[in-house]
Image (tube, grey):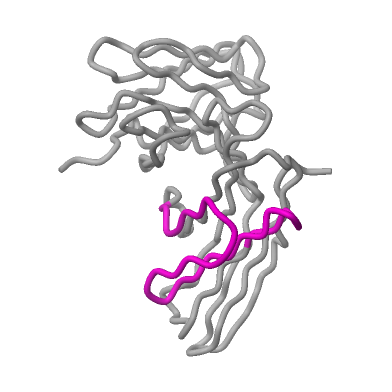
Amino acid sequence: QKEVEQNSGPLSVPEGAIASLNCTYSDRGSQSFFWYRQYSGKSPELIMSIYSNGDKEDGRFTAQLNKASQYVSLLIRDSQPSDSATYLCAVQGGSSNTGKLIFGQGTTLQVKP
Amino acid sequence: DAGVTQSPTHLIKTRGQHVTLRCSPISGHKSVSWYQQVLGQGPQFIFQYYEKEERGRGNFPDRFSARQFPNYSSELNVNALLLGDSALYLCASSFATPENSPLHFGNGTRLTVT
């Protein structure tokens, strides 16, 4: 079992729709959760962080965390073509607790005009 | 303010050669981490340094080594290059230890081994 799992996609949504990206993790002791956006050929860019159960909203982005189910999600409202990118889920803490990030393989999002 | 800077941006090496990648963290940041990203995969943790001390090492062979200098910049060295070392190498810095402050990534060094 991979430590952090994401559906590689591609996930295709029309412009203006809600995109829903999902991630599960295996280490129940994980404490910090992040979503990074990576455009093709570029480096990852932090867009959301979440540390406690529930929802966290920032503009068009909402991160959701359910530690009991070991599940993290990212909702993108009013999706724009510029949101087309690979979204990486990253988990920190857990048994090693050295601060290293464990990434999923990423979900490719395509927003079609 | 300058972000995390990495050099070189692109590099082509031959199998068996050695490579040194460099990273300058954001001013004031004391922690540097290195990640390897193979095409189509998420980044994988290689090393973490804080205040010039190694705090963590990922599941990479001893051919990979790194260090952090007094000015908090860092080098990643890879010896005896293999074709499988071809990847994007990412450096990330944080103000404090990564478990206490978010990571900011540089633009990476694209290494191709032929």
Q: Does the magenta stretch include residue A73?
A: no
| Relative to A85, residue B67 above or below | above
x, y percent for residue A108? 60, 65
x, y percent for residue B17? 54, 14
Exactly how many numbered labels are in the figure? 0
x, y percent for residue B47? 52, 22
- Left or right: A86 in relation to A41: right
In this view, the residue in front, A45 or A65, is A65
In this view, the residue in front, A50 or A75, is A50
Residue lying at the far right in this picture: please name it: A1
Question: Which residue sits at x=40%, y=42%?
Answer: B102
x, y percent for residue A8? 70, 61
Toward which corner of the image does residue B108 lie, by quadrant? top left
Quadrant showing the N terminus of chain B = top left
Type of secondary structure dominating the magenta stretch = strand
In this view, the residue in front, B94 or A43, is B94
Question: Which residue sits at x=20%, y=31%?
Answer: B27
Question: Which residue sits at x=26%, y=10%?
Answer: B70
| Relative to A77, residue B11 above or below | above
| Relative to A71, residue B102 above or below | above
Quadrant showing the C terminus of chain B = top right
Question: Which residue sits at x=58%, y=18%?
Answer: B57
Residue lying at the far left in this picture: please name it: B1
- Left or right: A111 in relation to B62: left
Toward which corner of the image does residue A13 lie, by quadrant? bottom right
- Left or right: B15 in relation to A60: right
Toward which corner of the image does residue A18 lie, by quadrant? bottom right
Q: What range of the chain is rendered magenta?
A: A45-72
